[in-house]
Amino acid sequence: MTEKNYYKILGIGKEASSDEIKKAFRQLARKYHPDLNHNNKESEEKFKEINEAFQVLGNEKKKDQYDKVGSSAFSSQEMNGFGSQRPDFEDLFSDFGFGDIFNIFNRGRDNEREDYLEGADLRYNLEITLEESFYGIKKTFEIPVHETCNKCKGLGAEERYLKECDKCNGSGKIKVLRRQGFTQFVSVGLCDKCNGHGKIATKYCDNCKGKGKIEKNQMIEIKIQKGVNSGQYMRIEGKGELGRNAPSGDLYVVIHIKPHPEFKREDENLFLDKKIDLSTAIFGGTLEIQGMDKKIKLKIPAGTQSHTNFKLEKQGMSILGSKKRGDLFVRITVDIPALDKTHEKSFKIFLNKG
Ligand SMILES: [Zn+2]
Ligand SMILES: [Zn+2]
């Protein structure tokens, strides 16, 4: 039996909490669930794999065992029991803030669940400078989040101004008939007139103007660690969209580093282009460089060629989660001057060509 990396399958790290494991599983399961991917072999396989990973990582005892000896600890027999263990679609989706789209799977239980809606995750792109990444920084910003309107409970109108939808007779669902050859398919879809609410507003709620949601600003303060790079993100629990009688979603702050006018960055290393004049190239000298945090004197040896690289150790970027630093590479180009007639003559004598 081949060794399987259940953490990788769920796209999480070994340190993931049980909540995070559950969340990762649900997100993937929603994507690959057979009920949403009819006759798609690939997603079916993927779904089995995800399920298998969760059967183990979602169970404290099994997870312990797996962490110690790997997936071979679980006999194929145990895993082949998949069919009977297949998680119920409803269980997977109903309490996960999927809102109206998935309420269709909670037939007959809509009213019970209407007041429970987990907030969605949000993504925020935060641009910082290279210097801010170098030193680390505290950032404060505001993001708009949406809260369910209290006055209409998210329905967009007060109860007394709601009437039963005439298209779906208040059920929120409509039957869709589709004919293919001699076969007729019936599927149930959300009513497009009432968006599945079963009710239509005759007068919109004045608090939310019928949107059912109120936008408010949320202040976010985060500490950005030294050495962070573009594409890395921080997850701030509970700072996403607000839930309705349920936890809020999470906020993912994704870092983008602005291009620097002088330095180019590659992971922990920095690169800098510098020009020196001809006499420094020939006779040598000292070049003063403004490094990330201090001025550095770079010794240029006599006879330095254009495009020579100098490595300044530990003068690069801070390394995330470490006290170390990368290196700074300085690439020298020699500035060849345009000479006037008198200089040309003496220069030729100097080169023994005159
Ligand atoms: Zn309707
Ligand atoms: Zn309202």
Image (cartoon, rainbow, N blue to C red):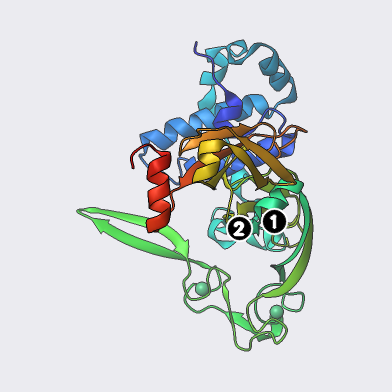
> Disc 2 and disc 1: Cα gap in Å?
20 Å
- Residue at horizontal 50 percent and vertical 30 percent from the top: 48
Residue 204 in the image, given as x and y percentages of width and height:
64, 86
Q: Where is residue 58 in the image (x, y as percent from the top left)?
A: 68, 30
In front of the other: 103 or 5: 5
The correct choice, above or below, for 73 with respect to 349 in the image is above
Using the image, tell me which numbered label, if any, was put on residue 118.
Answer: 1
Q: Is residue 101 above or below residue 133?
A: below
Please indicate, yes or no, whether residue 109 appears anywhere in the rendered image. no
Comparing labels 2 and 1, the label whose residue is closer to the camera = 1
The numbered disc on residue 108 is: 2
Disc 1 crowd rating (10 Å Cα; few below 14, some 14-19, many 20+) is many
Q: Residue at x 72, y 59 (%)?
A: 116
The numbered mark at residue 64 is none
Say which element carries label 2.
loop
Mark 2 surroundings: few (<14), some (14-19) or many (≥20) residues within 10 A: few
| Quadrant in which residue 316 is drawn | top right
Going from N to C along the chain, the mark reached first, 2 or 1, is 2
Callout 1: helix, strand or loop?
A: loop
Q: Which residue is drawn at 66% across and 86% down?
A: 161
Q: What residue occupies the far left of the structure in this picture?
A: 181
Indicate the amino acid at tag 1: Glu
Residue ID at (43%, 40%): 350
Q: Quadrant of the C terminus?
A: top left
Q: What residue type is labelled 2?
A: Gly
Residue 131 image offset from top left, x and y in percent? 70, 52
Ligand 1 under 8 Å from disc 2 Cβ? no
Q: Which of 186 and 50 is in front in this view?
A: 50
Q: In this view, does 351 lie to the left or right of 249?
A: left
Between 165 and 296, the one lying in front of the other is 296
Query: Is label 2 in contact with label 1 (beta carbons under 8 Å)?
Result: no
The answer to which image quadrant residue 138 occupies is: bottom right
